[in-house]
Amino acid sequence: MTTGSIDINRYLHQKKSLWNSLAILYTLVGYVGSIALLLAANGWLNGLGVVLLTHSLLFSAYLAHDFMHSALFESKAWNVVFGNVMLWLNGGCYARFEDLARLHIAHHVNRVDFCRFDLTTFLNAMPAPVRSLLLALEWLYFPSLAFLLRIRSIFAPFWEPDRTDDRLRNVLMLLIRGSLFAILGIVSPKALLLYFVSYIGMLTILRFVDAFQHTYEVFAVGSAIPKRDRAHEQANTFSNVISLRYRWLNVLLLNFGYHNAHHELMKCPWYNLPDLDRALFNGDEVQYITLPELLMNYHRYRISRLYSGQGRGVDEDGKRSLETFYGAIEVSFLVLPA
């Protein structure tokens, strides 16, 4: 089924202010409250703080994604304001919200993924000890490549000619955020360490979910892009929900797993995606793969996917093929490819 056969206004313009407010309030209060818990002397409260901070950071990321689509407010200006707030929380603020949104919308319109440099080639060009260390950390589930790409993106204005205007902005961002983290470290080194643990948790979950949502081709930014149609888009998009049976569980990731529905109607707000998904699909399509089913793939291919590409989630007979679904590397709407 396509959006031409349903009332799209029901999903686009039926704004649920209460759901929006609760999600934004939870994210902001959860972020501040979790830091207070990290500062507490009680270990159990510290543990609760790590979980709450990780989840608040995840919500900030997925809310930023909806704001990039101008999906939550009728006013584009308010989407930009709150999108910038969310990027400040999760560290995506070193790229301009407008630039991230433009690149992400291009991913939808062109039905491809973008990069500025080949990560595998970049790794192979490194000194062997450095490359081995990064890969060893990845093998141990430390997201070293995620940090590498974020560091490159922060300093990219100093070598990318189209981002020279961001030099002063990024330096100021580093000074302000660095000072705040330094203050937290002075007050409580333990709290700063636990914050880092939470941030690693956010990165790991984001990259796990991102890895198995597409088997798109990857093109360099600015290169010629072949024309792809809706059939290609849906065939190479996967709905990696937490659960199809207990749909409420998907709210834990703001319904981001309903990815086929999201690509069919990209401005549909997160809270309307489950209904849109039910209207468009039967639920037994080959593109449905739950996240628990993909845990083994994430583990098994955590290093080899660097050299094997995304693989295929569907074989030539149109059947699911988890054995060949390796997953993408570091496809994120929070980082400009540097």
Image: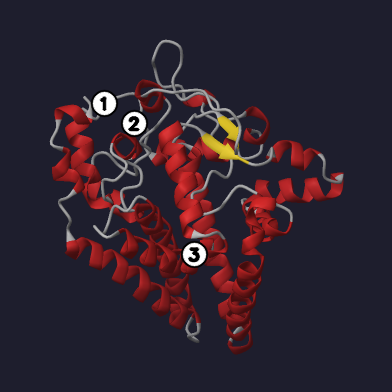
Q: Which of the labelled discs sits on residue 90, or is there none? A: 3
Nearer the observer, disc 3 or disc 2? 3
The N terminus sits in image quarter: top left
| Mark 3–mark 2 distance (CA, rounded to whole Å) | 29 Å
The residue identified by callout 1 is 284
295 left or right of 19 in image: right
The residue under label 1 is which amino acid type?
Asp
The residue drawn where x is 54% and y is 72% is 195
Asked if disc 2 and disc 1 are in contact, CB closer than 8 Å, the reply is yes
The residue identified by callout 2 is 288
Q: In the rendered structure, which disc, 1 or 3, sits on the residue that comes first in sequence?
A: 3
| Mark 1–mark 3 distance (CA, rounded to whole Å) | 35 Å
Neighbor class of circle 3 (other Cα within 10 Å; few <14, some 14-19, many 20+) is many
**Closer to the camera in the image, 78 or 120:** 78
The residue under label 3 is which amino acid type?
Asn
The residue drawn where x is 63% and y is 62% is 165
